[in-house]
Amino acid sequence: MDDTLEALVGIWQDIKIFLRELANFAFKSLHISFLRFEEKKGVVVTALYRKRGKLSRTLSHSGMVAITALGVMMAPIIAQEFPGKSVNPWSISVTPVVLSASTDDPAIDTQISSKVRDSVVDYKVQSGDTVASIANKFGVSADTVRWGNGLTNDKIKVGQTLKVMPVTGITHTVAKGDTVYSIAKKYDADSQAIVDFPFNTFTDDETFELAIGQIVVVPDGVMPAAAVAPRVRQVTPDAGTVTAMGQFVWPTAGRITQRFSWYHPGLDIANSTGTPDVAADSGRVIYAGWDTAGYGNMVLIDHGNGYKTRYAHLSQIMVISGQNIGRGQAIGKMGSTGRSSGPHTHFEIFLNGVRVNPLNYLR
């Protein structure tokens, strides 16, 4: 009997050692995975952009299920294996964190402005803060801060909590009858910008249907009373140069409806269906056809000097892969194919494989 009890005690000690090692391994694995995720999160953002939100709900749901399951299994072991630090993991407060930062700490300022945010956050006003400085910290316009907090002037006080948008623009709570198009019109914005913002979700990804009561981010939207100036209209100049110059002519005529941003790495130029699209510089067509990632009918041109350009959502393609093409030569016609809410040309410039702001290169 004593031998049996001693054996059972030995087995239990072995089990405890095993569980302890398992807990340590799990912690190390989670830590490594988190660091790898931080290194690779740009890939996730790119995937969300290319799928325009189709992956967001699947990604978040599957991730939460896996993390929750692991937490349930490991919580009791973790609590027992760290003497003096035992806590009930389910009693920890889940109150939302209120961001605050001192203007004296440039490292914190940089962290706030560069972090990709998916929703409105609360920011506690610090000594020395102004509406303009807070807007600068978060990379949005001062008007965005004013509109989001109902400010009629720039008077704020220390300790006051302000709501800050993830991008320049405005938020809208969906009411009965609202559509992407009606919301865009109300705030003098472009419906494509609402569709492209990766954290706006739709009950139907084909018709862009919205749920009553949901909060929609309207990038570059303005308060109705402030919508007074018309959008800038850009016209493609006469161009016929046959040698790639690294300076690009406008690919089409129309008005800019969406500019370059971290989630929209290109320029949207809107006009009527059938408006001609031309090559922004001379080069060779390396792709002309349908793109399954949301660009629809698309043309990609290699200019042979480190630059490439993309022309998306075309209603008609007028070139073929392998064709040499001159600067200003027609490559297709504007349309609304792929993931598009209306006729426009989505234009991108690549420099050594990296997408850059077209407005810095167009002439």
Image: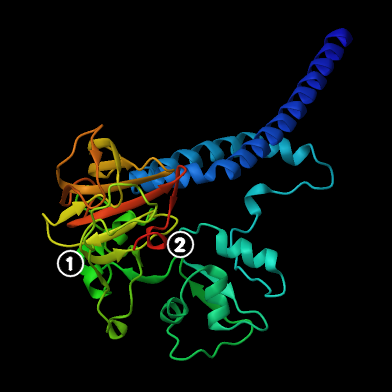
Query: In the rendered image, which quarter is residue 304 located in?
Result: top left
Secondary structure of the residue carrying tag 1 is loop
The image quadrant where one finds the N terminus is top right
Secondary structure of the residue carrying tag 2 is loop
**Residue 119: which numbered mark, if any?**
2
Between 243 and 178, the one lying in front of the other is: 243
135 to 90, vertically: above or below: below
Between 294 and 357, the one lying in front of the other is: 357
Question: Mark 2 is on which residue type?
Answer: Ser
Residue at 53% in and 45% down? 41
Query: In the rendered image, which quarter is residue 113 located in?
Result: bottom right
Residue at 55% in and 39% down? 67
**Residue 177: which numbered mark, if any?**
1
Percent across and percent down for residue 241 are 27, 52
331 to 362, vertically: above or below: above
Which of the marked residues, 1 or 2, is nearer the chain's N terminus? 2
Residue at 18% in and 57% down? 342
Are there few (<14), some (14-19), or many (20+) residues within 10 Å of tag 1?
few
Percent across and percent down for residue 83 are 84, 42
Question: Mark 1 is on which residue type?
Answer: Gly
Are there few (<14), some (14-19), or many (20+) residues within 10 Å of tag 2?
some
In this rendering, the label closer to the viewer, 1 or 2: 2
Between 304 and 301, the one lying in front of the other is: 304
Residue 60 visible in image:
no
Between 304 and 277, the one lying in front of the other is: 304
Percent across and percent down for residue 278 are 21, 52
